[in-house]
Every structure is written in structure tokens, then in C-alpha cells.
Amino acid sequence: MKHLILILALLASPAFAVQPDEVLSDPVLEARARGLGQELRCVVCQGENIDESNAGIARDLRLLVRERLVAGESDQEILDFVVGRYGEYVLMRPTWAGANIILYIAGPILLFFALFAGFFYLRRRGMAQNVAGADLSKEEEARLVEILKD
Amino acid sequence: MIIELGHFALILALAVAIVQAIIPLIGAHKRWPGWMAVAIPAANAQFFLTAFAFGALTYAFVTSDFSLRLVAQNSHTAKPMLYKVAGVWGNHEGSMLLWVLIVTLFGACAAWFGTNLPPTLRARVLAVQSSIGVAFLSFVLFTSNPFLRLQNPPFDGQGLNPLLQDPGLAFHPPFLYLGYVGLSMSFSFAVAALIEGRVDAAWARWVRPWTLAAWIFLTIGIALGSWWAYYELGWGGFWFWDSVENASFMPWLIAVALLHSAIVVEKRESLKSWTILLAILAFGFSLIGAFIVRSGILTSVHAFATDPERGVYILFITAFFTGGSLILFAIRAHAMEAKGVFSMASRETGLVLNNILLAVAAFVVFIGTVWPLVAELAFDRKLSVGAPFFNMAFTPFMVALAVIMPIGAILPWKRARLKRAVKSMSGLMVLALAAGLLVWSMQTGRTALGPVGIALGVWLVGGAATDLWMRTGRSGFSARMRRMFKLPRADWGKALAHSGFGIAIIGIACLTAWSEEDIRVAQLNEPFTVGTLEITLLNVNRLQGPNYITTMGEMSVSENGALVTTLTPEKRVYPVQAMPTTEAAIHNGFLRDIYLVIGDPQDGGGWAVRTYIKPFASWIWAGCIIMALGGLTSLTDRRYRVAAGARKQRNVAMAPAE
């Protein structure tokens, strides 16, 4: 199997995303390979993952991933191996480590503060009702009465 | 000669823009009517001069005048006429000229349709709009001049990137720019309001149609781009979280938030400073998007200009307008006092939540997009942020938004009873959950995405229908039906836009969860099975197109012994650029798309063939079109056609408007 893949890799014409000759016969392994393909970036392309890319190096990586899957490695082992070769640049999903934690928690933190600020804004608008009654125009007062009726 | 006239017209337009950016502003400050009135003829002149320059460049492309450097680099005599014209904006210089044309077009529209604006506000809006014109006209003239001649014109041009030679993509940039630049109008109104120190319901009513128009164009532009990616790139993806896609998506999200918060300003005189801030941010994100695309700093498929000088210039423009307006905001925002009073359970609260979710979602997209840059500059780490991150970080916001939307939409203003709203929607809630559970039970061992998407879609579409129905009062069925069609167009627009969102969610969830894929070597006349389909490669022909050579497969698709369709996927080679493209053949269906791609001939005989079955794919773009139609319907509402003025709404209980 390993040899077959390597031979096919050498024979390859300009590749075009995942080729029929790359597909593993075991559907479970192939599904894992496709999952990993989505997580790895084609290093010479512009923001494409290796599954979508037509570049030769993306094909090499796809074959590498499959070769290691067949050899029985886990998904994480394979990702680690590729990162060891090409650096964390190849990971489409940044690692949860060091400064990247900022990236992951920035959204939730902002959401928390926004909800907090929103809550106090709304409460202030609600409280204003008791004191600001005098500021209402005649029309607004009439509407207020009308609304409070039901 | 026409080219030189066009060049000259563009220089004149810059001169006019400078005058228009200064004189009306002074006039409005000093209350000099003559100086304020300068803005109107100036806005007209600026538009017609730029339009002439754009026409001159188009003329050069149509007549294939290769003495013009831009034409020689981006056109070819063998190209079909559509792409000769589309070639005008298929490159950096021409697309910037289109951008400037749209800036001046919106300025001219404000001059034409803004006759009911207070004169000082109109003068200030036009002056601010013109200052944007100055920035981009000078950018075009000094760094990206499309009118440069060549000493020795070549015999033929270098042609347009084949990927761009496609009807979907020919119209993608103009729509996108109408959206991006349309947001400059809301920005100009916001800055003018800050200078005036006054934001009221009337202001919001003037701003909303411009934002709505920009949002409609942006929606169509993004949908066209995504549709193009779906059928052209050859594996049926529709959204890649590419930095340039994100650049168009961030202003879209902020524009949606702005549309909703402006309603609160219009109806309830609250959220004023927040709305101003959103208007600034919406255009700010458009400028950041322009910077991302033009500087090539986050390299992507779209970047056609990687000239540092241009990048720096746009960065300067972005910093000036965003920074300047934010400083102005910091100084003046406190002048905008909220008047409206409302309780915690009210439509206002629903809209505040909508704004929080949309703004934070836009921020998440923003930080994900710029993070590689930040990490490299600040932490010396070269890394990527791709689709897996965005799917994980962004999706929860859209789910939350979809969950609260139908409830928020039916809550009355000021003071609502949450229990009553939930009660009137309880039937629909059960229906949506049941739909989700049904789908859940039918699928085995796959993601929760499909069931959740379907439940949310049913909830949103049903919610929009319920909303319309609840507005029709309490009489008999036929009377209510009649009344439903007489509801204001704004109500219909809202229902359409909200259900369009639901339909798009169904499409995205189903496509992501249940796509089927088959990659194989197909031999001629040997049928193979994918899902329930039987597919046969009948024959493969090599044909000559107008400016390409194509390998066209003929494939029949049948299901249960009956022929469904015959498709002809192609692989084209454009000799001028020596570049291959795939032309997938798609059978669009209501419930599924059948998507065929032909690849290379194999050494052992046969052809590489890929088959995809994409359930509900058309729903994604149908949803986008329905959203845009909703916007259009709302834009034609009576309020915007008659002179703006507070229309009294007597019967609050029956028609709580909007």
C-alpha cells in the first residue's frame, strides 16, 4: 500500500484536489484523512486547506497523512508530525497555547462585557420611567397611558 | 484623445471634491446659505466627471486600446464582450475607479433625493461624503492611475484571469462596492450628526434607507461571490473564511446591527450614540476590508495589488476616517441623550440583544482575520486561522440570534409581557423542536448540525409568518388574510428578511451535514452508484471555445431507472494565461443539487470524476435573495416615499409598526 501510494505520487500529473488514486480503501480511515485534510493548510497556497488545493505540495501532504493513517497513527500524532516539519503555520485551527488563548477568549469576554453593559443600560432605561415622567411629551404621555392600560 | 479627456475629467473631479469638502462645511458653520448650496452642483459635477472618466476607461477596454497599460495587462482581443467590460473592474486600478464612481454616485444621490433634509445637515453630509471622495480620487490619481499609456503598445493583451471570466463574478464587484461604499452614506450622516450635535427620530429615518440600500447590495454581492465559489472552484464549498470574504462579511454584520439599532432611534429615540458608533464602524470595516484586499498583507486569492505604497496610502485613509470620526464621537457623543423609556421586557431589549450578538460576532470575525498578523508582529509566531476556528467561534452567535429573533420580533415596544409572547409562539416552538427531533431520529451517528439547523429554520420562517398573522387583528380568517396583504411594506420586508435568514440557515446546515461525495476513476459507459443515483460517463470531447480549449464530459444521471438529467462538466484551458479551470456541471434541484466534476484522464484508462450530492444547496442563495428582497420591500415602504415626518400611529395595540 505504502509503495503503491509513493509510486502513484511520482506519476502524478498536475494534481487537482483529492484524486481518485489517493482515496484509501478503508472508508473509516479515509473519513479521518478528510477530517485531517480540513485542518491542514497548503503552505504555498492562499488560505486553502490541503483537501481543496491543487498544488503539488498539498498532494504530497495528503499522501503523507494517509500513509501515516495506514501505519496506525492517531490524528494528533499526525498533526504533530506535520507541525514538526512545517511549523504551526500549517494548522488551520490555532493551538490553545500561549498568546493564542487571547484569540479564543476575546470573543466570549467581549460578549460578557457587552451583556453586562447592555443589562445596565436597559435597567437604567427602565428606572428612568419613574423619574422622567415629566420629560414626556403630551403625545408620549397619552401613549404611555394607553399602553399601561392593557 | 478620449482617454486623455477621461484622465483630465478625473483630475477635475478631484478639484471639485476638494471644494465640496470645505466650502459647505464652513457655510453650515457660519449659516451662509450660498456656501452651503455649493454642495449640490459640486456633487453633481463630481459624479458626472468621474462617470466620464469611467466611461473613457470602459471605451478603452471595449475597443482593446493596448496603448493603455491597464488594458494591455488585463484584456485580450479574443475575450467575449461581457468580459471586456467586466475587465474594467477585474484589476486594481479599474476597480478603484469603480469604487470612486460609486462614492460620487452616492454623494450625487444625497444631493438629488435629500431635498427634504435640513440645509445644514445636507451641506455637512455632502461635505463629509466629498472628503471620502478626495481621499479615494487622490489615491487613484497618485498611486493607481488607470490612464497611463505605454511607449510601445503590444500587439495583443495579456488577458483577464480565467477564474474571473464568469458571469457570476462579472457582477460580483459592482454589487459589493455599491454595498461597501453605500455604507459611506451612513458614515457621512453619522459624522454630520456629530458635528451638528443632534440625533433624533428624523435623522434615523433619513439614514435608514441609505443603510438599507447599501445592505441590499452587500447581501447580493456576497451571495454572488459565494455562489461563484460554489460552482467554479470545483468542490462545492460556498464559504471559506478567507480573509477577503471576512472583509466583506464584517461590514455586512455591522450593517445588519445598524439597520436594527436605527429602528430604535427612529421609533424610541434611544440607542443614539450606539447607532452613530455602528455607522462609523460599518464604514470603518469597509475601509479595513479595502486595506486587507489592496495591501495584500493577509495574502488571499483575491489580492491583486501587493504594492506597499498603496497599502500605506489606504491604511492612512482608514486611520484618518475611522480614527478621526471616533475622536469626534468621543468628544460629542454625550450630547446624544436617550429619551425613550422602556422596561426590561420590550422590543428595545430584543434589539439591544440583536446588536450585542451581531457586534460581538463581527468582532470575532475581525480578531480571527487579523490574528495571524498580530501573532507575527507581537509574538513572532507564524500561524494560520482558518475555517475550523471560525466555524467554532462564529456559529454560536448565529444560533443564539436565530433563537431570540422570532420572540424579539413580536414583542411590543416599551413594555411587553414576555410570557404572552412566548405563549403565542409556543405552538411554533413545539413544531420547530419536533422537526428537529424528526430529522435527528432519521439520521444516524452524524453531527447535530442538521437537526439544529432545520429546527432553527422552521422556527424563523414560522416566526416571521406568525408575526405577520398576529398583526391582522382578531376578526375572521378571510378578513385577516385581506388585512395581511394591506400591512405596511416595512412589515412584509421584515418578515421576508427574517425568513430568508431561516432559509439560508436550513441550506447551510443541511449542506454541511449531509453532503455526499464520491471520487473515482470512471470508465466510459460503465455506470457507478452514488447514494441513490446511477451515473454514467457517456463520452469525453475536446472542443474549442471563444478563448479557451475545453475537455467536456457527457454524463447521464438516473435514479430508480429513470433518467434525471444529462450533465456536461468541463475542464478548460485558457491558452493566453496557460491556466486550467474546472467548470462543474450542476443540476440544481429544490431538495438537492447534483454536482459533477471531470478531472484528468488516467494512465490506466478512464477519467477522474467527482460526484457530489449537495442537499438543500439552492436554499443558501435563495435565502440570501429573499433577505435582499425583504430589504427592497422595506425600502419601498410608504414612509420613505412620502416626505419624512412623524406619522402618527394612533392604534398602537393593533399596529405596533416595524
Image (cartoon, rainbow, N blue to C red):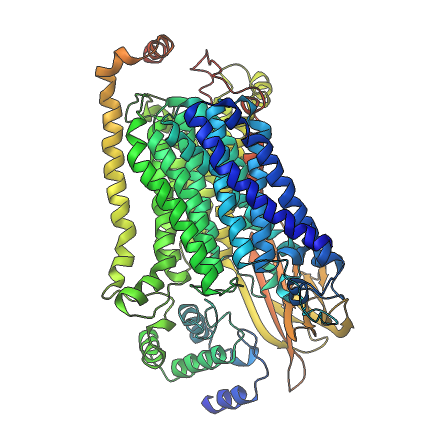
**x, y percent for residue B441:** 43, 51
Classify residue B118 as left or right of residue B600. Answer: left
Classify residue A11 as left or right of residue A110. Answer: right
Q: Is B117 in front, or is B180?
A: B117
Q: Is B383 in front, or is B529?
A: B383
Classify residue B366 as left or right of residue B166. Answer: left
Which residue is found at the position 54% from the left and 32% from the top? B39
**x, y percent for residue B67:** 71, 65
Residue B204, quarter of the rendered image:
top left
Which residue is found at the position 54% from the left and 29% from the top? B492
Q: Is B208 in front, or is B76?
A: B76
Q: Is B314 in front, or is B260?
A: B314
Residue B83, quarter of the rendered image:
bottom right
Which residue is found at the position 55% from the left and 58% from the top? B144
Q: Quadrant of the N terminus of chain B?
A: bottom right
**x, y percent for residue B247:** 45, 53
**x, y percent for residue B520:** 59, 75
Q: Is residue A65 visible?
A: yes
Classify residue A150 as left or right of residue B179. Answer: left
